Image: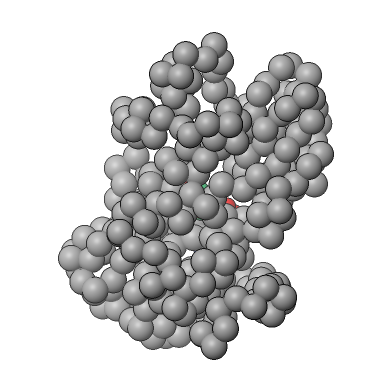
């Protein structure tokens, strides 16, 4: 996705993968800067650590609580988050609607990307916003943060913002009542992964968004969405849009989106 974009833009640069052990993000950033890198993408499990390892933090990244993009300018590291805004762009492209028109359920709102997407939904002002996370401590923590942000910024006034207990019955009940269901957990990456909801609560009226990406695009959630005749988008869409926004932070101009889309399709 990024290498075809660099070629198309006539830039003599290359996008490469570097594996970094947990706890060594700051050191890795220092070395990448010294080696002359222009920018960095950060993925699982480093997005929280990256927050502390940059020199300047973008206000949105601070709100979303994670950094997935770093731009290196004049030797300084600028941290951004493109998962949240990339999610907004991809929902608009996939379903042709704004988040503000939707009642949304987010499964896995306590993870790095899940929490960013959840907060982005709050900032966008959904019609109603429900979220759940397997580990209760994490969802309680996120819930407190959301309430604080909601009060401070006066967001979603008079609308439903609710934490849902991670039990099959509760999740199914809420899922049946919303428009958009987002899987922000890592469940679905493997073929044998279970479905987090009962298939009978996924209907044709639903918009299904699975942040997980697989080469065949067929997570169990997407398979059930197809069977139900629901509209759906998989993680490739988010991958593309968060990547396009990263490009924009690195180079200060819009990304060649169609070149990146074709690159991504060719890669899978
Ligand atoms: N398409 C894209 O461009 C894109 C971008 C970012 C992320 N993603 C995908 O989004 C997913 C989440 O990313 P992340 O950064 O938030 O990961 P993360 O920080 O590792 O969080 C993982 C989340 O999944 C939940 N989870 C893991 N195993 C589970 C299980 N068996 N049952 C229920 N919940 C489970 C965790 O819940 P606990 O808190 O209980 O552990 C947590 O909420 C990943 O699949 C990632 O690949 C895609």
**Is residue 19 visible in the rendered structure shown here?**
no
Q: Where in the figure is residue 200, as x and y percent of width and height?
A: 26, 78
Q: Where in the figure is residue 68, as x and y percent of width and height?
A: 62, 43
Q: Nearer the viewer, residue 129 or 28?
A: 129
Residue depicted at x 70% and y 42%: 79
Q: Nearer the viewer, residue 67 or 224?
A: 67
Quarter of the figure with residue 102? bottom left
Quarter of the figure with residue 4? top left
Residue depicted at x 49% and y 76%: 129
Quadrant position of the N terminus in the picture: top left
Tell which residue pokes out farthest to the bottom in this image: 158
The answer to whether residue 247 is above or below residue 158 is above
Q: Where in the figure is residue 144, as x and y percent of width and height?
A: 70, 77
Quadrant position of the C terminus in the picture: top left
The answer to whether residue 111 is above or below residue 173 is above
- Within the displayed image, which quadrant is ligand 1 positioned in? bottom right
């Amino acid at each position: 996705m990024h290498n075809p974009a660099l070629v198309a833009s006539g830039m003599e640069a290359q996008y490469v993968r570097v594996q970094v052990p947990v706890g060594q993000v700051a050191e890795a950033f220092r070395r990448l800067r010294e080696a002359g890198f222009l920018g960095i993408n950060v993925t699982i499990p480093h997005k929280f650590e990256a927050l502390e390892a940059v020199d300047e933090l973008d206000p949105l990244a601070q709100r979303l609580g994670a950094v997935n993009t770093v731009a290196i300018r004049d030797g300084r590291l600028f941290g951004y988050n493109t998962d949240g805004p990339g999610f907004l762009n991809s929902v608009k492209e996939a379903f042709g609607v704004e988040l503000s028109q939707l009642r949304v359920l987010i499964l896995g709102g306590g993870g790095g990307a899940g929490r960013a997407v959840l907060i982005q939904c709050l900032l966008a002002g959904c019609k109603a916003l429900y979220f759940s996370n397997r580990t209760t401590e994490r969802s309680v923590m996120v819930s407190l943060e959301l309430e604080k942000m909601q009060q401070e910024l006066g967001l979603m006034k008079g609308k439903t913002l609710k934490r849902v207990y991670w039990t099959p019955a509760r999740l199914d009940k809420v899922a049946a009542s919303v428009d958009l269901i987002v899987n922000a957990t890592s469940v679905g990456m493997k073929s044998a992964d279970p479905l987090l909801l009962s298939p009978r609560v996924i209907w044709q009226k639903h918009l299904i968004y699975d942040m997980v990406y697989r080469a065949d695009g067929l997570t169990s959630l997407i398979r059930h969405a197809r069977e139900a005749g629901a509209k759906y988008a998989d993680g490739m869409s988010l991958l593309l849009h968060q990547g396009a926004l990263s490009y924009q932070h690195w180079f200060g101009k819009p990304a060649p989106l169609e070149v990146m889309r074709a690159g991504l399709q060719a890669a899978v």
